[in-house]
Every structure is written in structure tokens, then in C-alpha cells.
Amino acid sequence: MGLRGLARGFAAPRPFVVSAADGTPDRLAVEAEMRRRGWRPALSPAETGTLVVCGTPGAALAEAIETVWRDMPEPRVRASADLEGAGGGAARAPLELDDVPMADRADDRDGLRLDVLHVPLGPVLADWPAGLRVDLTLQGDVVQDAEATAVDTADGSFWHGRPAASRLDGLARLLRVAGWDAAAERAAALRDETLSGAVPEETLARRFAPFARRVGRSRLLRWMTRDVGGVRDALDGRLRDIGAALEGRDVPPRPPWRAVLDALPALLAGTELGEARLIVAALDPDLGTAADG
């Protein structure tokens, strides 16, 4: 065995975590346990042979998960939400050309002939709203058309009555999509402390305030989110709402997910792929219920 194989043998597992619309409690438990073990989640099923499914997927999401499962590298392991059995699984080489969707050609908005790619985002995707699928038509790296579909829903949202934790969860996801992993981990830790009830809200508010200032004043994050489908405004609003909720003040309810999905195509048209992911993360639809608070 060479050095690369030896290092791989001692590498910590990197499970790929998928959540159904009703899987938020399991997902939070999985994230907390991975953090305790010092594991990092896989960003793609192609990176790992370990799959963790949270909640009870409906038929459409279950079919998408099975498709991903069949394509994961051997030996593969399907672990429970307590990560039992998650020590196995294999690593995989980088994406091969055969994995890339084929392209058509069409005129772009400037009349040039560019490749047209039909790219689905979700429903099995890291740092992505559970149960959401967005089908994109790309020319070059620009979104020409988008269609948002709810492929999995639930009867009620875990986040009802938990406004601060709900928005901290969405903030963590947005920061991960933006590539700021350390800040995302801090937001997730504050979320878990809020949910535990073991830390007084005034203490949490004091802990959150300097973190909010750091995120809000980040020049790189401001540069990344400026003029991107309202992402900056959504981020600033989320920081304000978290602070208000931790101080016991009322915050506006989150919009129904159906309204968010209806708005997505217009917001995504004309954006680049990375910007599209930021917009979805900023809107953060919760398909657990139509009005989740």
C-alpha cells in the first residue's frame, strides 16, 4: 500500500447527508454528532461511500436518493441517523468526463451560439433546502431559464415557534454555500445552543452580537452578495431577525414556501450558477409547511 492508500485508510469518514422535508430533527442530530467526532460532511456523493438519510422521504425523493446511492463508490454504506455503521465507505476519484451532462447549442442573449446545458439542482445536494429541485437551463455559465419544484413536503415544520434557531440554521447554510465554513460552524453551534434551552437567551444574544457584526462587516461576503438577487438584503435581514428573536422581540414570519418557489425562476434568470445557489440559500424555503414562522 502506498502512502496515499495508507492515508486514505486512516482518513475520517465524510458522510453525505440527505434530509427529507420531515428530517430536520435527525439532520440536526447528525450534524451535532459529526461535529463531536470531528468529521466533515461530504459535499458530493461522488466523494464518499457513506450515505445518511434523515427523516422519511416521499416517493419522488426516495427515487432520487436511490439513483445517487447506486452511483456512489464501492464499498458503500448506508448509515442511520446516529451514524451507526458510518465508518466504512470509499473515496472516489474526481468527476470524470462521462459524468458531465451533454450540451446542445442555442443563441444566447447576445446572439452568440453557446452550449446549452440542462442542470438539475437538488433534491439530493449538500447545503440545499430539503425536498427542493430546481431545473436550470444554462448557456455558458448563465441561467437562461429555471423551474422550481417541491418533490418532498411534510405536514408541519420543526421550526414552528423557534424563530432564532430557524434563522441560524438558514444562516449556517448560506455561509457554507458562500464558502465561509468557520462562520457557518459558529452559526450552527449557536443554533444548537438555542435549541438546547440550556443557555439563557440574554447570554445567547451577547454571544451572537459580535458574530453578527463580523458577518455583516465582512468585505468579501459583501462583495460576493452585492447585486445578487437580493441576497445581501436577505442576509442583513436574517442577522437582524436573529438578534431580535434572541432578545425576545417579535420577528416577521418566513414567507410560505410556495411563494418562494414561485419567485425563484425570475430571480435566477440571468445569474451565474454560483449566484443561483446563493439566492436559493438566502431564500431558504422550508418545505415542512406552507407557513412555518
Image: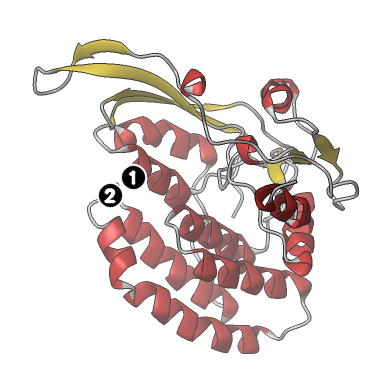
The residue positioned 74% from the left and 52% from the top of the image is 6
Q: CA separation, marks 2 and 1?
A: 6 Å
The residue positioned 69% from the left and 73% from the top of the image is 194
Q: Label 2 is placed on what type of residue? A: Val
| Mark 1, secondary structure of its residue | helix
Q: Quadrant of residue 234?
A: bottom left
The residue positioned 39% from the left and 35% from the top of the image is 264
199 horizontally vs 102: left or right: right
Q: Quadrant of residue 48?
A: top right
Instruction: Give the number of the mark in front: 2 or 1.
Output: 1
Relative to 21, residue 163 above or below: below
18 horizontally vs 240: left or right: right
Q: Label 1 is placed on what type of residue? A: Glu
Asked if marks 2 and 1 touch (Cβ < 8 Å), the reply is yes
Pointer 1 local density, CA inside 10 Å: few below 14, some 14–19, many at least 20: many
Relative to 236, residue 138 above or below: above
Mark 2 highlights which residue?
228
Res. 248 in view: no
Residue in the foreground of this view, choosing between 257 and 45: 45
| Mark 2, secondary structure of its residue | loop
**Numbered badge on residue 83:** none
Tell me where residue 30 appears, x and y as whole percent. 77, 55
Tell me where residue 162 appears, x and y as whole percent. 66, 64
Which of disc 1 and disc 2 is earlier in sequence?
2
In the displayed image of the protein, which residue is found farthest to the right?
Answer: 84
Location of the C terminus by quadrant is bottom right
Tell me where residue 189 appears, x and y as whole percent. 65, 72
Which colour style is shown? secondary structure
Picture mark count: 2
**Numbered badge on residue 275:** 1
The residue positioned 77% from the left and 68% from the top of the image is 36
